Image: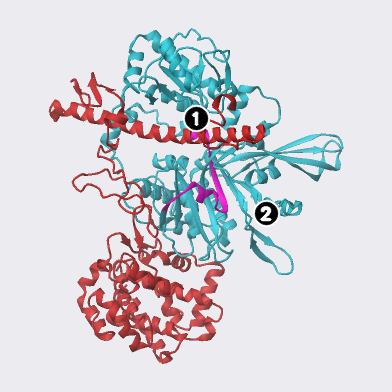
Amino acid sequence: MSARPATPASPKNHKVRAAQPGQPMYGCEHLQRLFNQDQATTNTSIQHYKAILRSIFDTNPLISQTAKAIDGQIVTSLTPTYLCLQCPSTLTEDDRTKHGTKKSHRFYVDSRSGSLYCQMCDDLVWDPTFEELRLKKMGTGTFSSRKRKHEELFETSDPVRDNPTYISSNTTAASCKANGLRGIYNAGATCYQNVVLQSFLHNPILRNYYLSDGHSAGTCDTHHCLSCAMDDMFQDFYAVENTNGYTAANILSGFWISEKKAFENLVTTKEQDAHEFFQFLAEELHERNGDGRKPETGSEHSCNCIIHQTFYGKLQSTTTCQNCSGVTNQVQSFLDLSLPLENLSHKKGKKGSSKHTGSLTLQECLDEEYIKSDKCEYRCHNCTSMQQARRQTSIKRLPNVLSIQLKRFEYKQGRNERAAKIDTPVQFPLQLNMLPYTNRARGPQDVKENYELARSCTYDLLSAVVHVGEIDTGHYVSYCRVGDQWFAFNDHKVELAQKSDVLNSKAYLLFYIVRSLS
Amino acid sequence: MPADAGDTGKAGVIIAPEDAPSMDKLAHAIVDDFLYNTLHDLLIKVHRDEKIARANTAAIKVEKLAVNTIDGATADPKPDVEVETDAAVYKDGKVTLKGNPLKSTKEILCPRCHFPRLLYPTDGKGARKPDPGVIYCKKHPYIEKPGYDIYGQTWVAPGPGRGKKKKDQKLDPNDPSSPAPGAEGSAKDRPPNVLSFPSATCSKCKRCILVTRLNNHMGSCIGNSGRNASRAAAQKISNGSNGGSQNNDNTPPGSQKGTPRPGSRAGSPRKRDVDEFDEDAEDSDQGNPKKKKVKPNTLTKKVILKAKSPATAINVKKDRAKGSSMLNVEQKADDETKDSTVQVAPKKQAPNPKGVSPAKKLKLGTAKPSLPSPAGKKAKRDRDMESESSGALSSPPPR
């Protein structure tokens, strides 16, 4: 197979992953034999495995899905094929046994998942060494342990602190029961806060930040600091064995005490907008953890605080003058993407496509905002006059956690001014590819780069906030994913949820996390 | 593509009719392949989790054995011994597997606490009885049971008055674990998985407030500016009672509403009153079990005052009937049990044990004259006052 490059002479020897307590050294006895033969075999095995993973994840799937049968016939299949670890053959499931008996090659790699099959076990084998490589490749696209920027932030380079015995003698392990799954009591029309807090609690980046003492409540001397309240809450969720609901008293009082003009009308005893609370909380936490500068809307403000590293991305709007074809770029940072629904659902309704009456997809909404361009008037520097222009907005930098608001609440102007809720169902995927909405999507790329780019733009749904009921009497509930399991959070009540429950909900806020982090 | 796989894809489940055109057959084959892939992916995921968990279990077991053989006194995490179980070998501080852990290892040990994992939920869907002789890891499978959360917990029903009254009552006989609204006040009779709403301390005034009332409380305690405060002020004025008193926020809204001045309530929707009353009731509900015992005096006092013999919670239900007949209020007995604790809740924090009660009494005084309208709509208000009065009377000055 041409896709498999010849093994380059590697100066360094590949090592089998060191023994970990509570974990076997090898995936099975047969792999143990393979790794214990000699260093050369270990080297070639690991190099081959890496090469196979590259061809699976970085190249056109046509290559790894095409097998050459024993009789010389070439078969491309949709279902998995098996790549021999010991020679460059790709085999169908049926031919795998024949190949094994003929060549005594016993290890194969599943072409769809990269997992290893041992013919002697007649089973898939999860070897610590190979699994580490596979997970790295799937996650970050590279085998090196280069960490993303935000991870470095939490890294403690202190050798004493990194010593496991130091850690075990100075900490108490949290109970196995403390898993962060608790409800939050409704303190009287505060479900709009609860849903946002739950989505923060199950955000791995924020969780790691707070649980690794990112904001140290002990040394913080701000009174009624919301970040300290968050710290308390994370401790209570992940370190305490309590399964009863949580009372977010400190968050609530911090919220009441906070003096933010922009959110003044949020602070009432009435039910409020969860999205506004999200913005409030994000800004407040930024101020407690960040560079102290107020986030200016519309500017390209970047800061190293946890909130910016988690939620903030950058938008680029390109304005092209229709007269002189001069291009102006403007970049601004965003906390979330707000997608209007009303116009789009109207448009769709007019088209009269009876198949999806009023039903939209998230991708359609994103297309409308970040692919299509619109006309506007602007003052062109070249022409020094007002000109017709085309404006096109795309995402310049994607955030680690992408928050999307579907604008379900619209203030209708007119004779009877009132806020109305748009109940149009919007289908959203569990897995979202954001590549088409970035400015990288335009312009040439080579194939390999394309796969890597697509991977870095793949997002997994993390949580969804849903508003049920009418606009003024409704209730907020949320769904959050922990591992592969979804949970429904309704104030103090936590229940198991099916993926279908999540996907059929009429989401209001969606939080997606970039795949390479999870 | 379908040529080599017979008539359809690899799963062999989605089969086109014999006489279908070739494009149809191709489409069927593709869908069939996708079905196969979906199942394949799911299976791989489950297989991976399970096999790794079992392999680690085998490793943990053999490591334990190794530590035990050298007589744990040294507590060396990597003893220099060679031991072997059915599933794994321990040698030179390394663990290697013997055979397939899916076959050799039957249980799963928690990698953190090394106790066996409970593999089935204890209640609800797919439940099995755990072995009582085994100490399990505290991480249990989540429970899937309608009306209960993932830990098998449920909450004290909000009680009557939230527009669900009939439904709640209907539920009682069918579901013994759902708390009877009447028995709400008696926490000791509840099964342990039935929780009540807790209280929290207000960060400003340090008072203990029931969680469901916390936001409202903070609105008046902290949020002393803006239109909300002015609205609250307006309400105070219109309520006419203790306008200048500083303990407004401590007065349960039920009693505020208790002042029957129809004009003042014109704008507020009916539901709100109900809610607030309710929350009030819950307020008293929580945290009472111990205190109840501590203060038998007040209890009996009240008992005498109100109904004949609700000393035990079981009686409360029966008493309902009596209560209602006596006082024209359906939830009479209810209130009473709740009331019995009204005086208790504020006690908990007791930074300054005097204050509220005088105010309450004061209010009571103003409220009482208006009591005599027993009919329909006013019933609730009366009830509120009733509860207020009983609380104030029976309690030694709280707060």
Quarter the N terminus of chain A occupies:
top right
Which is in the foreground here, disc 1 or disc 2? 2
Seen in the picture, residue B259 relative to A472 is either above or below; the reply is below
Residue B279 place in picture, x, y as percent = 41, 70
Give the amino acid type for the residue marked by disc 2 in the picture: Gly
Q: How far from the left and from the top, in percent, is residue A246?
A: 38, 56
Shown in cyan, the chain is A
Q: Which residues are magenta?
A: A495-518
Q: Position of residue A301 (x, y in %)?
A: 61, 40
Give the residue type that dot 1 points to: Gly
1 and 2 marks on the same chain = yes
Query: Which residue was labeled with disc 2?
Result: A358
Whether residue B316 is in magenta: the answer is no
Whether label 1 touches label 2, CB < 8 Å: no
Query: Which residue, given by chain and number where applicable, does mark 1 sit on?
Result: A139
Crowd band around label 2 with a 10 angstrom C-alpha radius: few (<14), some (14–19), many (20+): many
At 25% from the left edge and 37% from the top edge, which residue is drawn?
B114
Q: Quadrant of residue A72?
A: top right
Q: Colour of chain B?
A: red
Residue A166 in which image quadrant: top left
A457 or B221: nearer the viewer: A457
The number of callouts visible is 2
Categorize mark 1 by other alpha carbons within 10 Å: few (<14), some (14-19), many (20+). some
Say what secondary structure mark 2 lies in: loop
Residue A283 lies, with reference to residue A319, above or below; the image says: below
> Which residue sits at x=63%, y=39%?
A314
Whether residue B246 appears in this view of the structure is: no
Side of A31 relative to A447 (left or right): left
